[in-house]
Amino acid sequence: LSAAGGAITIADLVRAGRITASARSIDITSSGGLFFDKATATAGGLSISTAQTLTVNGDSSATGNVSLSSAAGLAYHGTLTSGGTTQLTAVGGPLSVASLTSAGSVSAIGRSIDISSPGSLTFDGAAATAGDLSLTTLDFTATGPLSATGVVAITGTNGISLGTLTSGGTTALTASSGAILAGDIHSVGAVSATGQSVSLGSTIALNLGSVNATAGNLTVTALDVTGTGALSASGNAAIDSAGGIALGLLSSGGTTRLTADGAIALTDLRSVGLVNAVGGSLDIGSGAGLSFGNARATAGDLRIATHGDLAFVGATATGAVNLSTTSGSIGEAPTGGVISGGNLSLVAPGGIMLPAARSGGTTL
């Protein structure tokens, strides 16, 4: 099909063979399925809509907007270039695009979605209604909601910025050369993230897998924060929860801030800089030494157990206080006092140096 000086408009194209179309603009509808080798709109938009599977095997482009829609599946095996916005729809089947370049925003709906791009993409929204969502770009931005009933995997090599993300499975975010900023993640499975800096938020509970900020800070804010995977940051680490915090390994190359209305529990905390921890109760272990600016349990016990030296400006609890180190000392300068509302236990083979200690119960 060719119309070099005008438009191609077909209300119902039914053809079993391969199709090539070139015109200033293209608008084709089919009551069946179509197979395109190529479609080029040289001075306008490209719109193809089918009732059955739409397949494009070669490279296609439009100087204007692109709309590809299928009531079944949409399989794009070549390179798609859009000079405007891009709308991709596969209501009844999978949606896949091997290589997408779009000057304007992209929206996508399919039972499952798999889209790759050699450049930057901005999504108005993407919904995988019965499967996984996989998006791979150089720079990734989403101004609208992203969702999948299955697994979500988003890669933006130079950075990821998104608002609302809903995942029915696990969630993986990767930005090897940039920052990750996710405003509100709802994920049934664990959330993993690797970026130069990582900021994760959620209005509900957030279960973390492996999270790594390779060249910056790590920030997590959620209703509850849990996880058994390793968390690390080359810079500062800050975890804030309206509920509780329960984590395995957290390594911070700078300062560490832990804040929760409920309990804070960490199996192994490593922090180069000062640690500030305020929660209903504290239970923190470390395979190294720790220095606390403030350790405060507002509604329970406080327990800190380290392998190396344990220093702090202040440690207070409404309940019992248990401070111990297997090989170091407690209270190396700068040091502060301990206030316990219950029993007080201090264990340190290297010695204990405290200017003041107050116990509401027994002292060991």
Image (tube, helix red, strand yellow):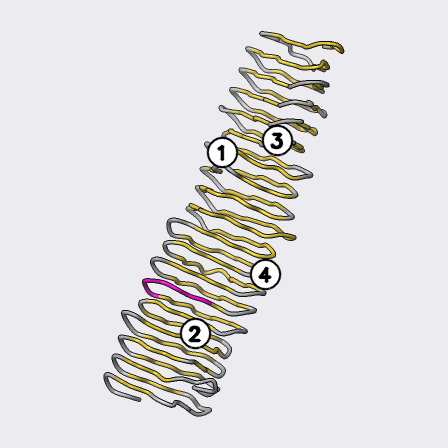
Task: Indicate yes or no whether the magenta region holds residue 69.
Answer: no
Whole-angstrom CA distance, mark 3 to mark 2, is 50 Å
**What residue would you read off at disc 2?**
285
Mark 3 or 1: in front is 3
Residue 261 within the magenta-colored segment of the rendering: yes
Numbered circle sitting on residue 112: none
What secondary structure prevails in the magenta region? strand
Residue in view at x 48 percent, y 81 percent: 307
Task: State the residue at coordinates (38%, 81%).
Answer: 323
Residue hosting label 3: 104
Q: Which numbered disc, 1 or 2, marks the residue that appears first in the sequence?
A: 1
- The reply to whether dot 1 and dot 2 touch (C-beta < 8 Å) is no
Q: State which mark lies toward you, 3 or 2.
A: 3
Q: Secondary structure at mark 1?
A: strand
Residue located at (53% from left, 65% from top): 236
Give the SS element for disc 4: loop
The Cα–Cα distance between marks 4 and 1, rounded to whole angstroms, is: 32 Å
**Residue carrying label 1:** 128
| Secondary structure state at the residue bearing disc 2 | strand
Front of the two marks 4 and 2: 4
> Residue 35, how many percent across, how many down?
65, 18
